Amino acid sequence: MKNKIPAPAILSAHDLREGYVAYWTGELWSRDINQAKIAHADDEIIEMETVAASFIAQNIIVDFAIIPIAHIAYKITSKTLRESFLISGPTIDYGEPSIEGALNVSI
Amino acid sequence: MYRYDEFDAAFVASRNAQFANQVARRLDGSLSEDEFRPIRLRNGVYLQLHAYMLRIAIPYGTLSAKQMRVLAQIGAKYDKGYGHFTTRQNIQFNWIKLIDVPQILAELAEVSMHCIQTSGNCIRNVTADHFAGIAKDEIADPRPIAELIRQWSTEHPEFLYLPRKFKIAVTGASADRAVIRAHDIGIQIIDDVKRGIGFRIYAGGGLGRTPVIGKIIKEFVTHEKLLGYLEAVLRTYNSEGRRDNKYKARIKILVNETGLEEFIKQVEAEYAISDTSSVDVDADEIARINAYFALPKLLGRSETKYDAALNDSAFADFAKYNTIPHKIDGYVATTISLKPIGGIPGDATSTQMLAIADLADKYSSGEIRITHHQNIVFPHVAKDDLPELCAALGAMGLATANVGLISDIIACPGLDYCALATARSIPIAQEISKRFESSQKQAEIGNISINISGCINACAHHHIGNIGILGLEKSGRENYQITIGGDATLDMALGERLGPGIDAEDVPDTIERIINRYLHLREEGEEFIDTYRRLGIEHFRVAFANQGQILSEDL
Ligand code: SF4
């Protein structure tokens, strides 16, 4: 597998059952970006791709991405525009969910 | 409203059972993602930027209060408490878990709803004028025809694997409110002096990376032969459309590459050899479907309360912008704007959806429409009930009086949700809407459309917005191209680009300068599109050039 993404980078994917974004921590998948393992070299990125392929084969994740990150001081930031929104989540403030009365409607 | 018959119900139930089984097989690994992807897409399940998204069909934009209640429940139980109404009259939920989809489909089926053919290379949800059956300028209600097409196209074995997706829209009025010329096939109901009521067929329209305005391919088709003719168009496309390059696979490319005349010839040749007897529609069948769309019994009502309430300026604005006259005197169709100032275009919370359902039962014979502008319509409101309805909507944040005005912005989900996006749309819409918050200013500007797409796929129809905004990525930053002069009516026109792309922060200022320029240049009685057509784009370029200034010196 040829690596084209420059280090440092992290591995993200979608959890197959729920679809939410998760990050590879080096041991497991976490929803918390701050737990993400950072690959600092090309061979570590290639290793991450192998990890992703194995979890895809086990039907645990789907649609993985290696995300190049900008810096790692206190916060992980993607170097690419699309992935920066993948990490941040929607930038819209919805406030508290408004579901009053809607959990069990009678039809 | 149309009610599913036994065939529909049995079909949806068996399809749901099949998909539940496919989901289980995907989860246990019997199906790979490559095998499962086309299956889930054909059932409306996308994997978006942050999660799975479920798209639910709302055929020709018509919903019952009961159905809206179930949508509210799905938002509350399986999503984050809101749903997004789209420019194709569907609804999308952005945070659905794959494991929940079979149960969601079962709950939808209880109210005759499903997600079948909301994605994939097949005939998609058929859309129609949201004022169908109500509007005074209507020749005939387009919904029975849209329903006929829905029945014919659902699981049509020949058209499940077309070269690309295929969208059909129907209008029955003299004013096109269904953007038929931006569809693969657009159907216009006409009343021909000699032949009576029939259909004019447009084909080859579509926006996206190659925007094309649909052209007339058949001046007149009868009710009886409509499906037979559509089959001939679809067969021609299915056999001649390109499958080697998905960017060139839509019917618009085929029509352009073949040439309109030659394409028409090919369709006619196909039609001539087709045995249409199995899809010919007799008058009884038309009458049967028409009966489902008969107007509810609307009693004569006084207008005293309505007249008195007009003294209140907020109510008067609501009545002016958010209602249109109904075919029946004393009634109006009322649009509920899902574009509050600074809000998210097309979004409604579960609580709002529930309130809308209850209010529809009380004030609109239980009937609701979804517009391609991402708003909601109560089709049958007695004028005398309007003050009470307006107050009830106001309490839910749903009485913004801005339909057709500058803050009634069409926007796709963009990079906040969409896996294909290159820039955000929603925050841009929010900022523009806040910039033009003043209702006096909006009234002064008058009728205008702003459409914002988060990528070249143009789901928000930016090419045909009077002002179109296309979000792209440039050097790792969001960058926005502005077009003006687009028109979504039967005189459809594609907007012209004003200049190079600009940063997100500069968009509201630029739009304000364009508007100032228009206010300065317009003549008595003109709307934005009229001024643009009279003067052309050059008169607006100055507004674009002077970035950073929103001053009267621009004028
Ligand atoms: S226009 Fe692009 S960003 Fe917007 S919804 Fe369509 S595909 Fe997504």
Image (spheres, rainbow, N blue to C red):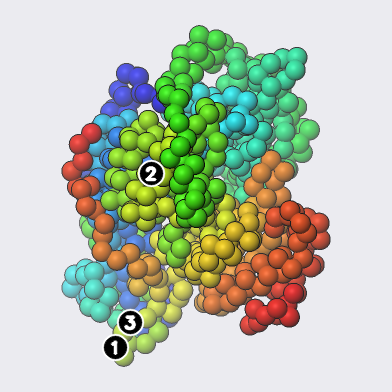
Residue located 45% across and 46% down the image: B309
The chain ID associated with circle 3 is A
Element under disc 2: helix
Q: Residue furthest bottom?
A: A73
| Chain for disc number 1 | A
> What is the distance, in whole Å, between disc 2 and disc 3 at their CAs?
49 Å
The quarter holding residue B388 reads top left
Question: Are the two marked residues, 1 and 2, in contact with CB atoms closer than 8 angstroms?
Answer: no
Q: Secondary structure at mark 3?
A: loop
Question: What residue does disc 2 label?
Answer: B389
Do discs 1 and 2 belong to a common subunit? no
Q: Give the amino acid at mark 2.
A: Leu
Q: Which residue is mark 1?
A: A74
Q: Is residue B513 above or below residue B124?
A: below
| Mark 2 belongs to chain | B
Measuring from the top left, give residue B4's x and y in whole percent. Answer: 36, 23
Residue B226: give x, y in percent of width and height: 60, 21
Q: Which residue is mark 3?
A: A76
